[in-house]
Structures are given as C-alpha cells and as structure tokens.
Image (tube, grey):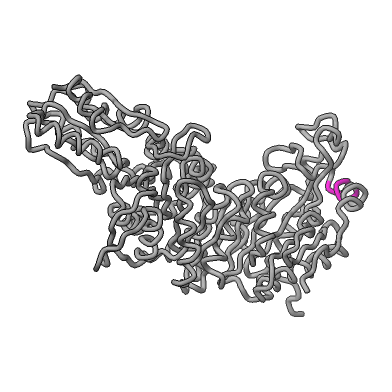
Amino acid sequence: MGKTFKKPEVLTDAHTHYCPGCTHGVVHRLVAETIDELGIRGRTVGIAPVGCAVLAYNYFNCDFQEAAHGRAPAMATGIKRVRPDLMVFTYQGDGDLASIGMGEIIHAANRGEKFTTIFVNNAIYGMTGGQMAPTTMPDQRTTTSPFGRNAEQVGMPIKMAELLSALQTPAYVSRQTVIKPKYITKAKKAIHRAFEYQLENKCFSLVEVVSTCPTNWGMTPVEAVEWTEKTLLPYYQPGDYNVPE
Amino acid sequence: MSKVLMKGNEAIGEAAIRAGCLNYFAYPITPQSEVAEYLARRMPEVGGVFLQGESEVAVGYMLFGASAAGERVFTTSSSPGISLMSEAVSYIAAAQCPAVFVNIMRGGPGLGGILPSQADYLQATKGIGHGDFRLLVMAPASVQEAVEMVMLAFPLAEKYRNPVMILGDGLIGQMMEPVEFPDNLKSEPSNKDDWATSGMDHRSSDSRNLVRSLLLEATELNDHNLLLKGKYDRMCEAEVRFESYNLDADYRGLIVSYGTMSRVCRTAIDTLREEGIEVGMIRPQTLFPFPINAVGDAAAKDSCRHVVSIEMSMGQMVEDVERAVKGRIPVSWYGKCGGEVPTPEEIIDLIKQRIA
C-alpha cells in the first residue's frame, strides 16, 4: 500500500513548542500544504510575528524574517515592493495584528499590497501569559481582565475580517476555523485561495483563523473546542467577507 | 561632470539614486519633505520604488523588510520621525541588515520647531533605540558633502551590515548649493546570498536564510552582542573621518564643531586670525565613530589652553570632546537651539573671553 499522507516538504522535522490543544500546528500545516501544492517554497518568505508563533521559522523550511510586534505587514510591504517576484506571507496573532499592529494591517490592506496574511485569532495574548486582547469576548476572564472583559470600559471585541472588508480596495478576506475536520477542509481552501490571489498578483489576501488557547483560557483541549463553537463562532462567523471581482 | 545648483534635500535624493539605491520609503515631515517630493517624480523615471508609508514606524519596517530581502534601501526623515523609526533601527541593527537613514534635524524636544538644529547628536551617536548597538553616523557641512556621504553610506552599510545615518541639520536640507555626483562613488551592491531572505531559488540555494533578532539563550545573546561590538570597534579603527582647520598655527584655543555650525566657526577663525588670535578647529565628519584621537591630539598641543564644543544644541557633542581631552585642559560648550544659529561675532566674542 502506498503512502497517502505525508509531511509537507516545507515543514521541518522539529517538534513544535505549541501547547496541547492549540491549533497553531494545524494552521502551520495548511499553510505548508499550500506552499507545496503551489510549488513556491523557493521563492517564499514568511514573516513571523511576536507572540506564540514567533518561532514559526523553526517549523517552516523556507526563508523567514522575524518582525517586531505588529509590524509584519510593513515588513511584507517592504519585501513585495522591492521584490514583487517573491511570495510573502505574514503569520500573526490577534494581539499582534488587531492591537499593536492595527495601523500596519489596515494600511497594507488598503494599499492592496500583494501579500498574504494568516491571522490566528484565539481571543487572547498567548505568549505573554493570557492577557486581554482586542478580540477577547465580553465577560471573558484573562489575566488583565480578571473579572471578565468589561465592554463598557474597553469596548467590544474587534471583528477584523469585517473591519478590513469595509475598505474599498479589492482584497480577499475570509474567516475560517480549524477546530474540527469539517472546518479544516474549508480553511485549507481559503488559505490556498489567498495564496493564489497573491500568485496572480491580484490583491491583498487575509485569512482569519478562529483558534484555541486552552492553556490561557484555563480549559482542556476538548472544552476549548466546545467554547470556541459556542462562544467565538457565533460572534466571529466563518465565511468569505470580501472576494475580489 | 558639470555642477548643478540643487537644494540639499533634492540632492540627497538624487545622490542615493546615483549611488545605486532605487528603493525609497518615507513619511512626510518638515524640513525634509522635499526629498520625498523629488523622489516621487524621480524614482519612476529610473524604474525605482517610491512608497509613502502610513507612519514613520511602518517606514522603518518597510526598510527592514526590503533590506532583509537583500535590496538597497533608504529613507529620510526629521527628528520626531526618526524617534518613531528608532524602534525599527534597533531591530535592523540587531538583525545586521544594511540600511541608510537620513535625519535632517529640527529643533526639539517634542514637536519643537521646524528650524535647523543639531539636537539629535546623542540620539544618533549613542544608540538610537533600545538595546546595545551603534549606527555609523556621518554629518555633512555642505550640500556637496551631503551628496558624497549619502553615496558612501550604502557600501559602508553593506560592509558592516549595519544601519548608517546621515545627520544633517535643517540648513543642509534647505539651502541650495552647486553640486556634482561623483561617478566613482557609485557602487555595486554587495553579495548577500549568505544571509538575505531573497528566496532560495534566487540564490540557487538548498538552505533557507533567517533574519531575526530574538535570541533567548543568554550566552547566545551575549555572543551576538560581542559580535556587534566587534563591528563597532572596527568602525572606530577604520571609519573615523574628520577635517582639521588651522591646526598648523600655534593656536591657544581649539574649536570642535560639525555640520553647518562648523562653517560659521570657520568664518570666526579667519576673522580672529586677522586680529592675531590663532584658533584651530576639528570638524568631525563621522560622529560615530567620533574622532577621539584627533581631538585629543589637537588639544594636547603645547600652545592650546582651552577646547570649546560649539553646537546647535544644549551641549551634546561636548561629552565626546571631554572624553577625548580627558581633563588635561578645560573643555567648555557654547550653543543655541530652536533654529538660532550662533553668529561669527558671537563666536569671536566667546573665543576672546574664554581663550584670548
């Protein structure tokens, strides 16, 4: 019987540092499969964020840069402007992209920069120890919202896919999740499509992936999946939010 | 090649192109916005990249990304904008990427004013952002020298894989002078295949490159800091540039001054000489590395009784002058801020009071 399932070429043999039940590993794999399928490893540059995925470059066997917190879209802009032939993707979390990097992502998207952003939204700061993010849900407890997020004081969680879709510049903006196989198939299609739009030099592309953080949520992996489905997905609804003509 | 009359800011933009840098990212700020305005028209003519970023913070990282991908890149800004870029400068220095930053200084702190100043000396020379690093800093005293320093900056940034800063005051950017662009200062970009994230296919390599600054192991980061220090030490050995004036005379006083301020001092020195008062001058052309030995040697001359650092700031370079003179003779400071430039008459009176 032949081999039907193998590790993507662009993934290294390293064991990831991600916690049990974290979905970063799944998202890495989907990006890696896409790079393999498109045959673009030799001209791909990834940009790692600050946050749990800062060490993504240990897992991807392609050129990689490491950004400061939130600045990956500006770095990607710099690369694509001087080397439009390169395939560039940023891999960012919600603290990185939706808080400190809000300016960079909105302007890169609005300029129509031809790179791809994988935006992993788990509604919390992971690497720094579970602090409140702009995406943290109302009443969600974090280390800096110990009594639950008070929306009257700090506002409602930011819906990035919707926000970026309000821009008039053509872009591909999609929100997906990877908490169950049925979602993973759709997320893979969206990520593949996002890279294809870049390959065609068509538009900016972003896939938001609603993800889990059992460690900082204080849940088991199974509870985290259930909480994501019950609490996050009704607010962060999956689907394509903007598709270029 | 014939000379053309150009405004400093425009000449700086043209110099980068002539040096072989066709990638420019910037954010408007007075008194250097003419660089961006000039290059917005000029870059398309030469097939180059011009992009106005959304902030100086973003521009700094556009440089980082472009440089890390192996391309020559530069930006221009002025004091408050440089503060915003300083975050990226720290990352760029840490990741050992070449990039050129031009600071056409205005008065500070805060918004300060838009008139010429030299108030960013300490910021530029003592490590502009967080962490332990230095920039190679050159300070032009004329539009022609600004052109030459910009052209030199690119190969120097590549030689040391470190950011280089051209530190000009607002006058350098705003005044018009005849300039030429020396062909011999055009340079070929260095080969960056061993480190740049240019794409594995681009360099026909099976191994990937990684540009980063995160080093979580204490010993690893210490080793990295030692490596960086080694580069700064080599700069101090090989890159010190300065100009001396009237040092053959038996001067009683020594002026240390740079940029536009040094031109005023030169006028004062000429006038004093006619009156029989000899004063020498060292004009640092590199502020880091500072010409510490040149200043120390000039101050050690038997006839010399006093050294004065004359700056368009409240006494910043004077700290380096004191470091050079090592307390052997008195060192003092004189300066003005906010766009006020000390006049030759003021300097003549000052020299007579303190030295003659």
Judge from the rendering whether residue A131 lies leftward or rightward of residue B40; answer left or right.
right
B243 or A81: nearer the eye?
Answer: B243
Say whether residue B61 is magenta.
Answer: no
- Residue at 43% of width from left, 52% of height from top? B96
Q: What is the span of residues highlighted in magenta in the rendered image?
A: A221-226
- Residue at 69% of width from left, 60% of height from top? A110
Say whether residue A222 is magenta.
Answer: yes
Judge from the rendering whether residue A22 lies leftward or rightward of residue B62; answer left or right.
right
The quarter of the rendered structure image containing the N terminus of chain B is: bottom left
Judge from the rendering whether residue B334 lies leftward or rightward of residue A210; answer left or right.
left
Q: Position of residue B299 (x, y in %)?
A: 16, 29
Judge from the rendering whether residue B328 lies leftward or rightward of residue A244; answer left or right.
left
Q: Position of residue B282 (x, y in %)?
A: 20, 37
The quarter of the rendered structure image containing the C terminus of chain B is: top left
Q: Position of residue B184 (x, y in %)?
A: 25, 65
Displayed quadrant of residue A111: bottom right
